[in-house]
Amino acid sequence: MGEIDVFGEVENVYAECKMDLSEPVRLRIHRSLSWLRQAERSEDLDVRFMCLWVAFNAAYAHDAQNTLPSADKIGFRDFLLKICSVNNDDIYHLVWQTYSSSIRNLLDSKYVFQPFWNHHNGIISDAVWQDAFSKARRRSHDALRDKDTSTILFVVFERLYTLRNQVFHGGSTHLSGVNRAQLKDAVRILSDMLPLFLQIMMSHPKEALWGNPYYPKVD
């Protein structure tokens, strides 16, 4: 599945149906597409990841004042559950067929597991993060075995959230070779998943399902 084809398809769908969408849903799609467009144009992996994450934020975010990581994770967890509840087949295909190896790489990487960094910041001990990582891997492997799409999707985005924090909060160097593998997997996954998310939203455009953007368009 090529990124350009996927992006072009979702733009075509939006052009055809945007007048029929409620303003909150249309605004979410419009904003998200603008960042997806920039991600597609850029050849800079770091910039592409940043644009893709902002596109994801535009699609799901509600309360921008609550900046606690737990609130952010609850927000995208609920969004992902809604996505899977209205269209699990296409998501299933991406998770289990197209990107299964990239997803496994992320799930097995300590570098996108937040407790690993909590240990290196002196918050928890080595034994605590190692135990947490072992338990998380077991849960992930159980979900992989059971083909539990929504659980795997949430865990993947939870790991991507750690990567997002590294990049957005200055915890990585531009063009650094340290996190290239994780960034490449992240960009591959987001480049196909986000257009699919937007298509699902446009196919199920009930305003109550996706909520209002926290920053509406005002005159």
Image: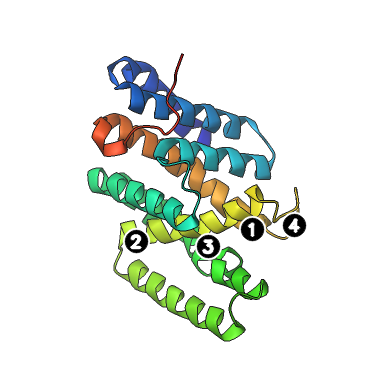
Going from the N terminus, do you reach mark 3 or mark 1 first?
A: 3
- Which residue, as the protein is rendered here, is positioned at the far bottom? 127
Question: How far is disc 1 from disc 4 in space, using C-alphas?
Answer: 8 Å
Q: Amino acid at mark 1?
A: Ala
Q: Which residue is mark 1?
A: 181
Give the vertical position of 188 relative to 40 (above or below): below
User: Label 2: how many residues lie within 10 Å, few (<14), some (14-19) or many (20+)?
Assistant: some
Question: How far is disc 3 from disc 1 in space, using C-alphas?
Answer: 9 Å
- Residue depicted at 61% across the width and 83% down the height: 126
Going from the N terminus, do you reach mark 3 or mark 2 first?
A: 3
Q: Amino acid at mark 4?
A: Gly
Horizontal and vertical percent position of residue 6 = 45, 33
User: Label 4: how many residues lie within 10 Å, few (<14), some (14-19) or many (20+)?
Assistant: few
Q: Amino acid at mark 2?
A: Thr
Going from the N terminus, do you reach mark 3 or mark 4 first?
A: 3
The tag on residue 177 is 4
Q: Which residue is mark 3?
A: 106
Q: Secondary structure at mark 4?
A: loop
28, 2: nearer the viewer:
28
